[in-house]
Amino acid sequence: SRDSPASSLVPVRGGGGSELSVCPGLMAGTEKLKTESYKITGDPRKPDGSANSYVKMTCARSNFRAAGWKDEDFKKPVITIAAPYSNSMPCNNQFRDLADILAEEVEKLGGKAHFCFTPVISDGQSQGCKAMRYSLISREVITDCIELMHEGYHADAIITLGGCDKSVPASVMPLARKDLVGLSLFGGPALPGLHPGGGDCRKRDADGEAADSKKGKAMDPKDVMEAIGAYGNGMIDMEELHRIECSALPGSGSCSAMFTACTMSSVVEALGMSLPGTASKPAASREDQ
């Protein structure tokens, strides 16, 4: 049928004489990237009885088809989109949407996107409780998860996303460990918080009482930590502590200062493992918030 998906495919002969189909609409050069994924989608250049041949990998393709893959997808390079994602932390809570955007662009360019979502733990969020014991080890877990999902599907190239203190290095480590074709993108720093006005734990009047701060004073996570100590020492009241809690971190993005995440992202960019300029692009605008 002229309207069937197979109508745009060109028949070719596999190594063992079996007739296959390839998609002529791939963007120029994209097909050259497909090397490793032939091992799981089946290599039409190999004899039918040999390892990784088109015939030998029929079961793998059957599973891919059950997940929605079409005939033309088996001729495309498989690109892993790795995103340490959680909806419970600001550093990485946009990564599911960003992964979808990246996948859409990969597909436009003739690739086949392959998602890998990993666990992620925030240093700042877990401080002060037992959860902080899971933060450092999460870096290795993220790295291992990305390697597992990339190598386990014989993907050809990879794009990773990094956001928090541990996911920025963890998203780069698999590329170096396995010498992969790919790059890592930083989710971006958050905008600084803006104090709504009222007491300021760093400003004192002559009597030692908290003085009024200038409305709109920029804040970041360190202001929250300082406020905890200020409250413990009687320098601010619970109302001011709550005011700082609610305004210091306005929305998505990594800590809005040169702490670990932003420093690491700058290093990754300097190493050439990320695109120029991506380390300093904010995760959101005031309008987004």
Image: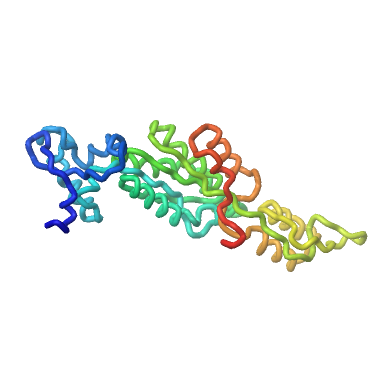
Q: Position of residue 202 (x, y in %)?
A: 80, 55
- Residue positioned most to the right: 206
Q: Nearer the viewer, residue 233 or 55?
A: 55
What residue is at 69 percent from the left and 56 percent from the top? 224
- Residue 125: % across, % down: 58, 54
Please provide percent x and percent y for residue 42: 19, 40
Rendered residue at 86%/58% (across/down) = 204
Which image quadrant: the N terminus?
bottom left
Is residue 140 visible in the rendered image? The answer is: yes
Q: Quadrant of residue 155?
A: top left
Residue in the picture at 21% in, 42% down: 41
Name the quadrant of the C terminus: bottom right
Work out which residue is located at the far bottom of the displayed protein and give it. 239
Residue 122 image point, x, y percent:
55, 51
Residue 100, quarter of the rendered image: bottom left
Left or right of 267: which side holds 51?
left
Q: Nearer the viewer, residue 225 or 20?
A: 20
Above-or-below relation of 6 to 199 = above
Left or right of 217 on screen, residue 98: left
Tell me the residue at 16%/47% (across/down).
Answer: 59
In this view, the residue farthest toward the left is 17
Decide which of 219, 282 is in the foreground and name it: 282
Q: Is residue 150 left or right of residue 120?
A: left
| Residue 130 is at least partly visible in this image | no
